[in-house]
Image: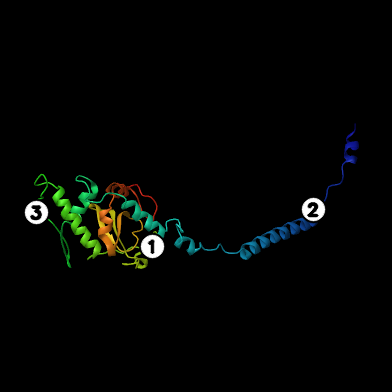
Amino acid sequence: FGSSHFGSSLPPPRSCSTMARTSRPILAVAVLAAGACLASQLLAFVGAPAPSARPQTALRARGGGEYDVSDADIEAFYASVTSGGGGDPPKGTVISELIVKFFHGEFTPQGFIRYSGLWKGPPPGGIGKKDIAVGVAKLKEQMANPMFVTKGGGGAGVDETQKVVDDGKGWVWLAADMGPGGLAVELFKSVPYGKRALFVAKQANVEEAFSKADWGAVLANVEKTLGGPQIKQR
């Protein structure tokens, strides 16, 4: 167990110059490997195709043909609102009140002047059958020869530039929509997409539609949206 025995078994220490010569190739290999990795990443970034823009046609086609209203749909709608006994809508319903509010009055080139006199009733002073009859008569006149027509047609969700005053199909629609002042009705000579279509008639024979009007079906249409996503009505 002498100290000379342990000393003779240890390898001689390597000089600093020998270690430096050994580490240089290792360092060079590491640098080359890192450079190759960075180069491959750069090529992958440059060569990758740019993400394609979202097709505009997908936005324009939103809804597709889901909400299209065909000629057959119009005929079916007409049949649904003309399967009754005709006459005037009952007193106290939303339909009769809308007709009186928006048609009992005078239509002038400057606009509609609503009746502001005493309602005939009965009872006098309140809206009754006599007032409803006047409103319905005015509605018939306007549907046969409308002074004011709102643009429609074109499909669901289209902008104003794609809408038309008259689609040439010969129908005239009474449709409602909710505005700042509450529910209001307008006349259309094209499909009132996205509105609450209440009633429709052939402009050349408005009287026929009113002679068979089903006011219960018309009233139910207040809660329905035509040619558009169903909207919870207020």
User: x, y (%) of residue 74?
Assistant: 37, 58
Q: CB of mark 2 within 8 Å of CB of mark 1?
A: no
Distance Cα–Cα, label 2 vs label 3: 112 Å
User: x, y (%) of residue 17?
Assistant: 80, 56
**Which disc is residue 19 wearing?**
2
Residue 168 vertical placement versus 19 (above, below): below
User: x, y (%) of residue 203?
Assistant: 28, 63
Residue kind at label 3, given as amino acid type: Gly
- Left or right of 39 in this view: 5: right
Residue that badge 1 annotates? 158
Q: CB of mark 1 within 8 Å of CB of mark 3?
A: no
Which sits in the foreground, 152 or 173?
Answer: 173
Q: Closer to the N terminus: mark 2 or mark 3?
A: 2
Residue kind at label 1, given as amino acid type: Val
Distance Cα–Cα, label 2 vs label 1: 79 Å
- Please report the residue visible at 18 percent of the width from the left and 57 percent of the height from the top: 137
Q: How is the image coloured?
A: rainbow
